[in-house]
Amino acid sequence: MKNILIILFCTIFCLSQATAQGLQLESAGVKAGINFFNIGGNDTDGTSSLVGFHLGGFGKIPLVNTLSFNPEVIYSLNRYEDVDFSGDVKAIWSYLDLPLMVVIQTDQVTPGLSFHAGPQIGFLLTAKLKGTNASGTEIDSKRNDFVKGSNFSFGFGAGYALPVGLQFTVRYLVGLSKVGETPDGEVFDVKTSSFQISAVYPLYKN
């Protein structure tokens, strides 16, 4: 609940600041898609990405010319597999993410095409291991104590909007902060990465 309140506060703050500067919300809508998530770093070895999903909403605030600011609020369920782990056990991390993207439209050159980039902060909701180990024992253990509560990353990608308004986007997120830690506070060199494919649709247009 605390993380959700932080996300809502950040979103409301960003929109209120934009309004205070005389900027107006041009459109808002929903987005959903799939993630290919993995971890890397000096303290990881033998992991492979698995398919997860994300869903949430976005707002579009025009800035200047072809630039706009697009804040998003996204629930993301991410999965990866430790291939060195004996048995069939998957890691599942879920986040409430706040991407803050700057978007440039290229309608004058290629109608419908856009590019975006910007930071993202994610607030950990759950981290757990789930599956069956080599001896056949079912595993369903919470691991929040071994993953930091927040994750900073940088995303960049592209999108293409159809004349009917439906847009498809791709985005790659590079983790900037180390997210592995022990309950005693020792930090490990573990960073996230994610490739996302999304469908985006505006529900409100000004």
Image (tube, grey):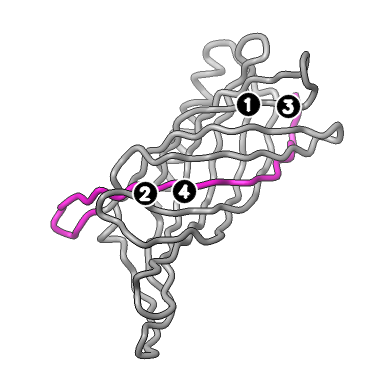
The label nearer to you, 4 versus 2, is: 4
Residue 72, above or below 87: above
Residue visible at 28% across and 45% down in the picture: 178
Q: Looking at the magenta stretch, what is its main secondary structure?
A: strand
Q: Which mark is residue 2?
A: 2
Is tag 1's residue or tag 2's residue first in the polypeptide sequence? 2
Is tag 3's residue or tag 2's residue first in the polypeptide sequence? 2
Q: Quadrant of residue 63?
A: top right
Residue visible at 34% across and 73% down in the picture: 85
* Mark 3 vs 2: CB contact within 8 A: no
Please tell me whether residue 6 belongs to the stretch shown in magenta: no
Where is residue 106 shown, x and y percent of the image? 72, 18
Q: Nearer the viewer, residue 201 or 92?
A: 92
| Amino acid at the residue labelled 4 | Leu
Residues under labels 3 and 4: Cα distance? 27 Å
Q: Which mark is residue 113?
A: 3
* Mark 1 vs 3: CB contact within 8 A: yes
Where is residue 12 shown, x and y percent of the image? 50, 31
Q: Which residue is mark 1?
A: 115
| Amino acid at the residue labelled 1 | Phe
Mark 1 closeness class: few <14, some 14–19, many ≥20 residues within 10 Å: some
Residues under labels 1 and 3: Cα distance? 7 Å
Q: Quadrant of residue 38?
A: bottom left
Mark 2 closeness class: few <14, some 14–19, many ≥20 residues within 10 Å: few
Is tag 4's residue or tag 2's residue first in the polypeptide sequence? 2
Please tell me whether residue 197 belongs to the stretch shown in magenta: yes
| Amino acid at the residue labelled 3 | Leu
Residue visible at 76% across and 28% down in the picture: 205
The label nearer to you, 1 versus 4, is: 1
Q: Which mark is residue 96?
A: 4
